Image: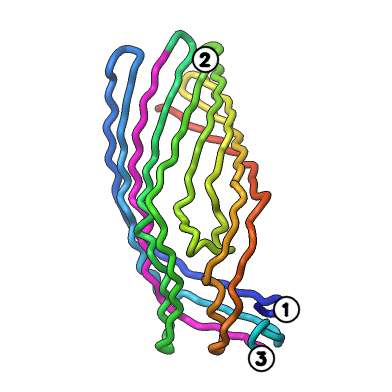
Amino acid sequence: MLNSDGDSKLTADDWAYGWNAAVHYKITENWKAGISYRSGIKHEIKDGTAELSLPSGNLIGSGPVPAMNIQKTGSADITLPEILYLGTSYEIGKFTFELDGQWTGWSSYDELKIEFEDGSQQVSPKNWEDVWAIRLGAQYSVNKMLDLRAGIIRDYSPIPDDTVDPLVPSGDRWLYAVGLGFNFHRLTIDVAYNYLDDENREFDNEVGKKAPYGYVAPELTGEFKDIDAHIFGVNVSYKF
């Protein structure tokens, strides 16, 4: 690795389309179930920009590396995953309990390949895996105007050990949620707070060994730790 810091940036824009389909079934007066599918979406990105800026320094194990300030134009194809949702809910008095499962087909992300206009390429193997997320939630209807909500989510990381890197340093995670629902006849306001706790994860692979100018870097090892986030959400809907 270099004994000095640098900057790398990828910028691109694209439009693409997909489709959704869903079925909701009322099994009994209190028991409901549903299934929803969202298609994968392929992005064919053109005229993106890659920027790399590095000061001169020493690459540990290989020696001096000259300063670099590179900007290239390139293209890439990325397929966002298909997603399947399964869910069921049951009402008991003022309580409603819900259990959901979300399958995400992340195996569509097998590599990040950027082809530059000068004929060069940058290929990063990813080999992400299909994963499930499990959600359990409950709602208590205080009255016609106010609902109280709470939930927990177990979300598994699709990133295998041999390709995990600082670009997406994600491990398996827990999310804890609380919320309020306000009902004003045709107007509904939902407020939610989520705490995300990403588990610590060690990495020891060859992702960082390919260095600029044909140099070979030592194997990069380390640990992603103390990763968390506070997420707030507000949703407003009006029925005509």
Task: Point out the tag, 3 or 2, that comes first from the N-terminus.
Answer: 3
Percent position of residue 40, x then y: 32, 54
- Label 3 and label 1: CA atoms lie apart by 12 Å
Q: Which residue is mark 2?
A: 141
Percent position of residue 147, x then y: 54, 19
Residue beneath the point at 40% across and 72% down: 76
Residue beneath the point at 36% across and 25% down: 88
Q: Quadrant of the N terminus?
A: bottom right
Residue 204 magenta-highlighted:
no
Helix, strand or loop at label 2? It is strand
Helix, strand or loop at label 1? It is loop
Q: Which residue is mark 1?
A: 4
Q: Nearer the viewer, residue 17 or 98?
A: 98
**Few, some or many C-alpha atoms within 10 Å of disc 1 (few <14, some 14-19, many ≥20)?**
few
Q: Amino acid at mark 3?
A: Pro
Q: Amino acid at mark 1?
A: Ser
Residue beneath the point at 33% across and 61% down: 42
Residue 193 lies, with reference to residue 28, above or below; the image says below
Q: Which mark is residue 33?
A: none
Q: Which residue is mark 3?
A: 66
Residue 157 lies, with reference to residue 152, above or below; the image says below
Q: Amino acid at mark 2?
A: Ser
- Label 3 and label 2: CA atoms lie apart by 65 Å
Residue beneath the point at 48% across and 63% down: 162
Q: Main secondary structure of the magenta part?
A: strand
Residue 212 lies, with reference to residue 157, above or below; the image says below
Residue 55 lies, with reference to residue 19, above or below; the image says below
196 sits left or right of 47 in the view: right
Helix, strand or loop at label 3? It is loop
Q: Which residues are magenta?
A: 66-91
